[in-house]
Image: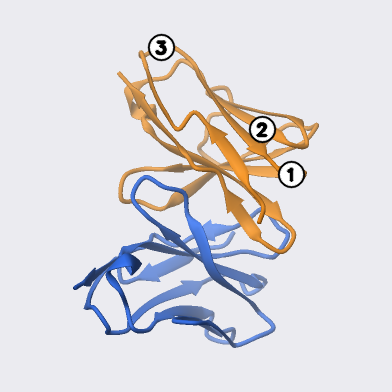
Chain colours: A blue, B orange
Amino acid sequence: GENVEQHPSTLSVQEGDSAVIKCTYSDSASNYFPWYKQELGKRPQLIIDIRSNVGEKKDQRIAVTLNKTAKHFSLHITETQPEDSAVYFCAASRYNNNDMRFGAGTRLTVKP
Amino acid sequence: GAVVSQHPSRVICKSGTSVKIECRSLDFQATTMFWYRQFPKQSLMLMATSNEGSKATYEQGVEKDKFLINHASLTLSTLTVTSAHPEDSSFYICSAMTAGDGYTFGSGTRLTVV
């Protein structure tokens, strides 16, 4: 089955700086890579996702890059704000397949 | 977007009792729902996949007799933690696959067994 590794486990940045979180996956058949933001005690919220037919996707301050050959994908947050502080999870699956696996999570702290 | 409603949000129960958690898809039909468990400061671990009208598929290491899953309709899936013990205390969360929205999560249930 799929195995997703995520780094770093914690990340602290100054407001306005960029944050990068990296994930690797093991199943070359995985083709769907979502990123979730989870605030304490709340449900994970999808913030961006990417399919394997593209290498990069951007939505305002958030971008995701995918390297299928190396089987890794990254989340980039620019101009970070204190409200970006949360735990971020990457995940990988075959789209429309139930076998979605999550990374261990990254606790991002943005210092004002 | 698609909404999954999960209840209760918090429950405290005595050791040995059973607790039922419900997840409803409000504006779409969820043929498949996924149940996750999350320990503090840890990731979401898939427990089982429930399919409407058929038996759930459990992940390795998850006791199917302890975590009973029922998916009686296209909009409702339930997880019952039977004979709960303190080690079952955790955050349980469901999700459903939706066309266009990817996976939509319920709001989660924090179970505390005392």
Is A38 placed left or right of A53 in the picture?
left
Percent position of residue A9, x then y: 30, 66
- Where disc 1 sits, the SS reads loop
Disc on the earlier residue, 1 or 2: 1
Residue at which label 2 appears: B77
In the figure, B35 relative to A40: above or below?
above
Marker disc for residue B16: 3
Type of amino acid at the residue the image marks with label 3: Gly
Disc on the earlier residue, 3 or 1: 3
- Asked if badge 3 and badge 1 are on a common chain, one would say yes
The chain under label 1 reads B
In the figure, B83 relative to A42: above or below?
above
Type of amino acid at the residue the image marks with label 2: Ser
Q: What's the residue at 36%, 45% (across, down)?
A: A41
Disc on the earlier residue, 3 or 2: 3
Image quadrant assignment for residue A27: bottom right
Q: What's the residue at 47%, 74% (across, down)?
A: A24
| A85 or A24: nearer the viewer | A85
Distance CA(mark 1)–CA(mark 2) = 9 Å
Q: What's the residue at 36%, 30% (across, down)?
A: B89
The chain under label 3 reads B
Marker disc for residue B30: 1
- Where disc 2 sits, the SS reads strand
Distance CA(mark 3)–CA(mark 1) = 31 Å
- Where disc 3 sits, the SS reads loop
Circle 3 residues within 10 Å: few <14, some 14–19, many ≥20: some
Percent position of residue A32, x then y: 63, 70
